[in-house]
Structure formats: structure tokens, C-alpha cells
Image: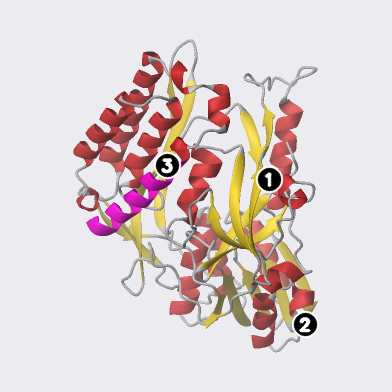
């Protein structure tokens, strides 16, 4: 574990170093390096020490996987003291947490006074990274970036399954960029380099949520509605032989899951599509498991600092779906979606199809903090409080779920809008569905531009 943590930290530090060394970045626009004051430096050190204390108190492994936590925090503090910008200081906080090599322990930096959008989404497929979507009207589209382009490098860094999430964390959360320099190869094999500009919009520093005329309350409601629209459960009833349900997140109530399962009862086969599902609430996982299992089962154990407890303490199946089941996963299926897929696999309840999952399976708590008096800065951290050990005695962290049937879309599939994974799953259940038609069932919905 120590060796893997060291490698992860080296990769993360390498990415951060590269980002910090480049010139045209969004944060430098709002705060040049020479304006990093001793007050701001002390504030960053306070953030580090506050989070470090909670990690020491709540982290599930009191031995921190062999990491000398006090020494690591001391090192991060010394680096902050030598930092020339706030961005560098915040990066050292993130690097300290990353030394634990834990998918659910990470720094949530203060929010930025702007929103940004690269207009492009990447995904690992097997061991290759592809552009899977390009927002219409974005600079990426204007520059000719297309779904199906293989991503060889982003800002000089070659993506892999081990570090793509770290790159996205840096570029989206920790250090948003003014642009992304992409090394691409299209489906025909032609390689090119493209510089795509991000779209930025300044935000109001203070929000008025009182509901008075001219306030920001309606914008807040619109954002909430947009989130709900994008993360709703969608389903297609193909015929009496098949229903397909797409769950983008585990954030549904029991009545919502019961409604989906109730509709599935009319069909001989059910496909639950958990691709790009990053997980969510444990109770939603419980409701979905109850919906497809006719009896009590061992789900997993939660290994905590003070002992081991069942992941789900009460499990009461009621009127579960009893037909044939296929679960779809990919490299972005994480956490609760991985647990669900692995339980189905262990119990031989159905087939798992698609790509290897993310291997991001721990249980954590989010902690929110504030620092400052006149000017208050809000920040946070996610801290793992339990490892999850499946019924086979193994953890999925850094391992993921290996599908029963490995089915990977090709570059030309992405370019042509085809979904061979869903088509293959329908075939397993005896339904003829072409990849072209499968790709049209759940059209992607971009979030509204803010």
C-alpha cells in the first residue's frame, strides 16, 4: 500500500507541478502570484491543519496505510510557507490528502468567483481515453474536436485509468484552466493538436436568496431544476421482453425505485444501465437491491476504525423483480453502482456487461469548514470513515468490478453515436436491438449554460 500511495502521490504532484508552471491560467487572472500575502498564506495553513485534524480523528485506518501523517502534514505546511500563490498553497493541501491513495478522501477547495465549461467530456475505454461528447457551440466544436477522437494527452499529460480522475480534479476543481491543449487522434488514425478555450462567466460575490425583486433565488431554483432534470431516472419499455432503465446517480427515494421496479414487472428482461453512475446514497442502493433480490443477502461489511459493521443493517425485499437481469457498467461507474453490480455478480442474479468499473469504493463523510471573519472563505473535505469489504472478502477499492462480458465501444462507435454495449445486453435477453438504435434511446442532455 505504501508503494502504491507513493506512485499516486508522484503522479498527482507531477500534474500539479506542470499546471503550476504554465503561464495562462484562470486563477492568475484573478490573483497574480505576487499578491499572495502572509495573511492568505496563514489562512491556507489553517485550512490544512483543520482538515488534517479531522482526518486524524475520523479516518477509518488509524495507521493511515503506513503513511506518517504528522510528517506529511509538516511537509505540506513547509511547502505552503514557500508557496508564491494561493493556488500553489491549495495544491499542497490537496497533495497531502492524496498521499493516502484513497478515492474518497480529498480536498474541496473554496469555490471560484466564476463558472467554467470546457465543452468536452473524456472517458477511459479499456486502456484508451476518448472524447465522448462535445458541447454544441463550444470552442472545442469550432476547433473540430469530435466524439470518437482518442485523447493522447491533455496539457502534456497522457491520461490513464490510474490518473484521469486526478487530471480532471485538477483541471475542473483545483485549478480550472483557460484552455486545454489536446493531442488527438481521430478514428482514421490522423493525429493533430488542438487548443480549446474554456468558457468562463463571472459570478456575483454575494448571492441574494431572500426572494426580493432582482434577487438570485430564481437562478438558484433553475440550477436545482437543471440538476434534477439531468439526474432523473429514465426508462424505455422496448416490448414485453425488455425494459431498460438508466440511473445516472444513486439519489432516489424508495417510492421512486418502487415505481421503476413496478414497471419492470411487465417485462421478461430488465437492463439497469449504471454507466457513468458515480454512486450516491446508501439507502438508494438498499432500495434497488431490494427491488431485484427475493431474499436477504450479504451485501458487504463496513470496516471502520472501531470495528466492523454491515453496510446495510436492514434488508427487507418486497415484491422484487424476478425476471432476467443485465447490469451495465463502465470506467465511470463508481462507489454504490460498483457495489450493486458486484452483489448481482456474486449472487449470480444477472450478467454484468461493459467495461471495468472505476474501483472507487469506500464510504466517506463530507466536512464543511469556514475561515475568516470580515471575509469568510468556505471549503471542505471528504474523509473516508469505512472500507467496504464485499461478501467474497475482498475490497473493490483500486480494483473495480470485472464484467462477465467485456464489451467496449470503438472510436467509430462514439463518432457514429452507436451503443454496442446496450445492443449486446439486449441480445443476451433475446431482443434484437441495433447499436444505431440503442444509441438513440437515451440522448445526452448537456447542463444548461449558467
Residue 282 visible in the snapshot: yes
Q: Which residues are magenta?
A: 1-18
Viewport quadrant of the C terminus: top right
Examine the image and state in which quarter residue 40 appears. Answer: top left
Q: Is residue 318 above or below residue 278?
A: below
Secondary structure beneath label 2: loop
Majority secondary structure of the magenta segment?
helix
Which residue position is annotated with label 3? 16
Camera-nearest label, 3 or 2: 3
Look at the image and tell me in which quarter the N terminus lies.
bottom left
Identify residue for label 2: 240
Q: Is residue 91 left or right of residue 116?
A: left
Q: Secondary structure at mark 3?
A: helix
Residue 332 percent coordinates (x, y): 54, 61
Does residue 10 show up magenta in the picture?
yes
Query: Residue drawn at (44%, 24%), measured in percent from left and top?
Result: 370
* In this picture, residue 6 sits left or right of residue 324: left
Of tags 1 and 3, which is closer to the observer? 3
Q: Tell me which residue sits at (61%, 73%) in the image.
A: 319
Amino acid at each position: 500500500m505504501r508503494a502504491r500511495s507513493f506512485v499516486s502521490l508522484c503522479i498527482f504532484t507531477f500534474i500539479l507541478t506542470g499546471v503550476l508552471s504554465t503561464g495562462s491560467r484562470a486563477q492568475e487572472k484573478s490573483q497574480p502570484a505576487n499578491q499572495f500575502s502572509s495573511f492568505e498564506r496563514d489562512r491556507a495553513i489553517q485550512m490544512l491543519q483543520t482538515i488534517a485534524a479531522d482526518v486524524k480523528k475520523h479516518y477509518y485506518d488509524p495507521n493511515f496505510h503506513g503513511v506518517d501523517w504528522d510528517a506529511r502534514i509538516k511537509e505540506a505546511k513547509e511547502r505552503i510557507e514557500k508557496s508564491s500563490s494561493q493556488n500553489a498553497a491549495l495544491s499542497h493541501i490537496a497533495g497531502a490528502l492524496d498521499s493516502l491513495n484513497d478515492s474518497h478522501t480529498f480536498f474541496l477547495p473554496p469555490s471560484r468567483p466564476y463558472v467554467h465549461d470546457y465543452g468536452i467530456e473524456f472517458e477511459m475505454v479499456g486502456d484508451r481515453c476518448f472524447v465522448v461528447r462535445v458541447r454544441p457551440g463550444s470552442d472545442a466544436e469550432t476547433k473540430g474536436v469530435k466524439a470518437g477522437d482518442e485523447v493522447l494527452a491533455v496539457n502534456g499529460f497522457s491520461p490513464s485509468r490510474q490518473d484521469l480522475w486526478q487530471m480532471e480534479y485538477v483541471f475542473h476543481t483545483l485549478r480550472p484552466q483557460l484552455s486545454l491543449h489536446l493531442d488527438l487522434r481521430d478514428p482514421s488514425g490522423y493525429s493533430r493538436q488542438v487548443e480549446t478555450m474554456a468558457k468562463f462567466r463571472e459570478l456575483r460575490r454575494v448571492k441574494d436568496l431572500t426572494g426580493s425583486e432582482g434577487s438570485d433565488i430564481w437562478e438558484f431554483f433553475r440550477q436545482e431544476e437543471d440538476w434534477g432534470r439531468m439526474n432523473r431516472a429514465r426508462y424505455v419499455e422496448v416490448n414485453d421482453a425488455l425494459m431498460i432503465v438508466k440511473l445516472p446517480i444513486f439519489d432516489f427515494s424508495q417510492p421512486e425505485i418502487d415505481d421503476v421496479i413496478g414497471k419492470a414487472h411487465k417485462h421478461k428482461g430488465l437492463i439497469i444501465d449504471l454507466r457513468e453512475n458515480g454512486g450516491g446514497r446508501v439507502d438508494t442502493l438498499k432500495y434497488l437491491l431490494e427491488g431485484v433480490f427475493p431474499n436477504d443477502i450479504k451485501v458487504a461489511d463496513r470496516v471502520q476504525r472501531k470495528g466492523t459493521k454491515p453496510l446495510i443493517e436492514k434488508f427487507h425485499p418486497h415484491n422484487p423483480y424476478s425476471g432476467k437481469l443485465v447490469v451495465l457498467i463502465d470506467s465511470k461507474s463508481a462507489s454504490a453502482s460498483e457495489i450493486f453490480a458486484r452483489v448481482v455478480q456474486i449472487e449470480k442474479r444477472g450478467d454484468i456487461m461493459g467495461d471495468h468499473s472505476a474501483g472507487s469504493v469506500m464510504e466517506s463523510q463530507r466536512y464543511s469548514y469556514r475561515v475568516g471573519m470580515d471575509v469568510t472563505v468556505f471549503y471542505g473535505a471528504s474523509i473516508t470513515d469505512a472500507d467496504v469489504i464485499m461478501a467474497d472478502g475482498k475490497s473493490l477499492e483500486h480494483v473495480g468490478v470485472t464484467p462477465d462480458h467485456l464489451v467496449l465501444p470503438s472510436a467509430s462507435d462514439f463518432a457514429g453515436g452507436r451503443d454496442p454495449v446496450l445492443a449486446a445486453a439486449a441480445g443476451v435477453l433475446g431482443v434484437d436491438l441495433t447499436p444505431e438504435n440503442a444509441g438513440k434511446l437515451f440522448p445526452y442532455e448537456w447542463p444548461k449554460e449558467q
